[in-house]
Amino acid sequence: MITASPRNSLSNNVANALLQAGTAFLRKPSTKADADAIIFSVKSFAAAMLAYYISLRIGLPKPFWAIITVYIVSQTSAGASFSRGVYRLAGTLVGAIATVVIVPNFVNDPMMCSAVIAGWIGLCLFFSILDRTPRAYAFVLAGYTASLIGFPSVLDPGSIFETASVRVQEISIGILCAVVIHRYILPKRMTPQLTGKLSATLRDARRLAGHALNGTSGETHEGRHQLAADLLVIQGLAAHLPYDPAPTPPRKILQLIHDRLARLMVLAAEIEDRVDALRLGDGHASAELIALIAEIGAWAANAETRDREVAAAQLIRHGRSVQKRLGADAAMFRDRLSANLAGHLAEMVGLLQDCDRLERNIAANGGLRDATWLHGPKQAMGYVYHRDAWMAGRAALGAIVGILVGCAFWIWSAWPEGGMAVSILGVCCALFGNFDAPAAFVVKYLCGSIYGVVISLIYSFIILPQVTDFRILVAVLAPAFLFAGSLQARLPTTFMALGMTLTVPILSALGPYYSGDFTMSLNSVIALFAAVGFGAVSMSLFQTVPVDGAISRLLRLSRRDVGRRALGAAPNEARWTSLMIDRTALLLPRLRLTGKVYPDVLDEMLHHLRTGHVTGQLRKAIPQIKGDAGVELREILSIIAKRVGGRKSSTTACLIDLGQRIETLIKKMAGSALRNRLQIVDLLIDLRFALDAQAYGRSTTDDR
């Protein structure tokens, strides 16, 4: 018998330990992020140098614009880079055409010409803020391009057409090189990111359902907020899918999943409120209902259970039977509330089961040929963006005012570098104007520009005079651009990296030949810092929206829309739910900045969502309700439109008065002979809980 020596055994143990440590290190998220950043940086640099080489070969006068374009277009995923390239090209063409039209027509009045260009930039910024999809980048670039070409040509309009034509060529070459490199060399596809995020979101949705069934309000609060944020992230990824090189999930399937998750976010709150109001743990609730909740909780927690679809169908039938039995002759309010809860439980199981099936459909790379097996709505709405024309107009007007102040100083002072400075100012307004507080991002860009200036001066007057070959030029440029590219791949340092990658090519004068001029470089540096510094100041004064003001406006618009739905406007429930979830997702980062307590503001948004949802359904049901009950329901909805839909939140006294009227109407409807009385009663219960769930739970304590 041969035995291993102690030395060999020790060596094997050390080797295994090193292998395990190495594997663990490679699997660390930080290691993966570093590797992704390095790959992105290398590909971006290769694309930039390829674009630079092509521009030099065909004789373009300012090939550094091709380098800049590569870094502006490049994104960490192939699909995002392609879509950004397409929209940048479209925006560049539109901006160049607009500049060629504007400048010659106002050639005799430089200030008026500057005002029209500023107005164009503001208009483009307005539409970019209003759009909120990747398409918004085309509007950004239409303003960005007009600023770069237009302002330097205000006092020299004779070469405007040639300048615009050359700039479009340089930018087009940069776009083409960036798209080709990122799409075909080690492409990072968007589809795996989306499917991974979708799977994690569905797991979170099942966990949210479990917390709602247990009545654990803290976990459900956090789960709802996370779900709202996840849906926005998924929509952001899905927007680039048409440009992804990999096979992508059908858009309709993603929309159907979104609609179900959006409804589930509301259902979780409905179920949690009813579980709390019925106090299922005190032993007075229906044993059948308690057993149903336990079965659904076990089913939701075990996603890999065999015969999951069969179990889901049984749970839905069980829930509907409990709802029908308890609601048919409900003499006590507890029974009506239990029936309402059973109906919501059955709906929740159906939604979760739909999500499971649709996810498997995506995994199998199949389209949705037959939607009859879906439990929820067959028609897909998809994500709905909140768009605020007033806020977009405010930002656009602020940008116009800031640019005009800069133009006035330039023209009246006859500053030789003023055209360049104002063009950089316009670029800052176009790139950063869609943030609530753009100055902070401009400051990051300025910090990157400082590094860029230092690097540029070293290149221009120490390194580049010694370079005589393109291959050597690439080698000496590599350290700076590879470092900047790795920073650009990381979200916290993206804008600082842009300050470097947009500054170094220009100030280093990476043209067809070396043209180092210290005086010209110094003037350009002064113009750069003056423009970016003034941009930070003007954006702070004219374009910054206070965080509290942005939050208050979102809440005020939500209250307004609740009132409109109570009066019968915007009747599509799926659209309303998705819109309110987007508003919730917009609130989350703002609340982190303001430091306010999460549940207060976010729960108010959730109450608006639920109130608007059910008032819209009740408004559509009014024609089916005859007599005094119909008149009373109209009056209740009118009061909601006036009080809840006002500019200020409703007082406790208003809610108590409304609640009492709703409870009276519930009793009246429960005893009526209407065929759809159970449906109306369910909606009225939903409305009562949506207005003030805690008060309603307390009001039912004696009716057990």
Image (cartoon, rainbow, N blue to C red):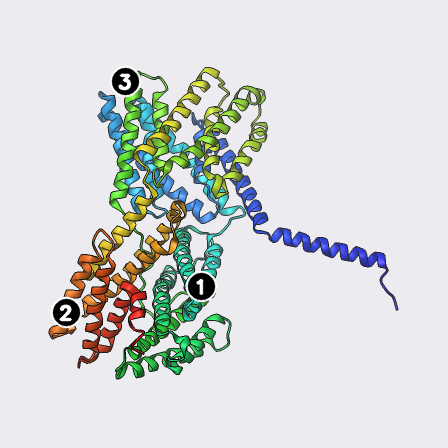
Q: State the residue at coordinates (84%, 62%).
A: 4
The answer to whether 31 appears left or right of 659 in the picture is right
The image position of residue 384, as x and y in percent, is 31, 55
State the CA–CA distance, disc 2 to disc 1. Answer: 41 Å
Disc 3 element: helix
Q: Nearer the viewer, residue 220 or 324?
A: 220
Circle 3: residue type: Trp
**Residue that numbered label 2 is attached to:** 632
Mark whose residue sits in front, 2 or 1: 2
Placement of the N terminus among the 4 image quadrants: bottom right
The image position of residue 275, as x and y in percent, is 37, 72
Disc 3 to disc 1: CB gap under 8 Å:
no
The image position of residue 3, as x and y in percent, is 86, 65
**Residue that numbered label 1 is attached to:** 202
The image position of residue 484, as x and y in percent, is 52, 35
Q: Mark 2 packing: few (<14 Cα in 10 Å), some, or many (20+)? A: some
State the CA–CA distance, disc 3 to disc 2. Answer: 68 Å
The answer to whether 108 appears left or right of 81 in the picture is left
Q: Residue 68 falls in which quadrant of the image?
A: top left
Q: Nearer the viewer, residue 319 or 161?
A: 319
**Residue that numbered label 3 is attached to:** 412
Q: Mark 3 packing: few (<14 Cα in 10 Å), some, or many (20+)? A: few
- Residue 460 to residue 40: above or below: above
Circle 2: residue type: Glu
Q: Earlier in the sequence, mark 3 or mark 2?
A: 3
Disc 2 to disc 1: CB gap under 8 Å:
no
Circle 1: residue type: Leu
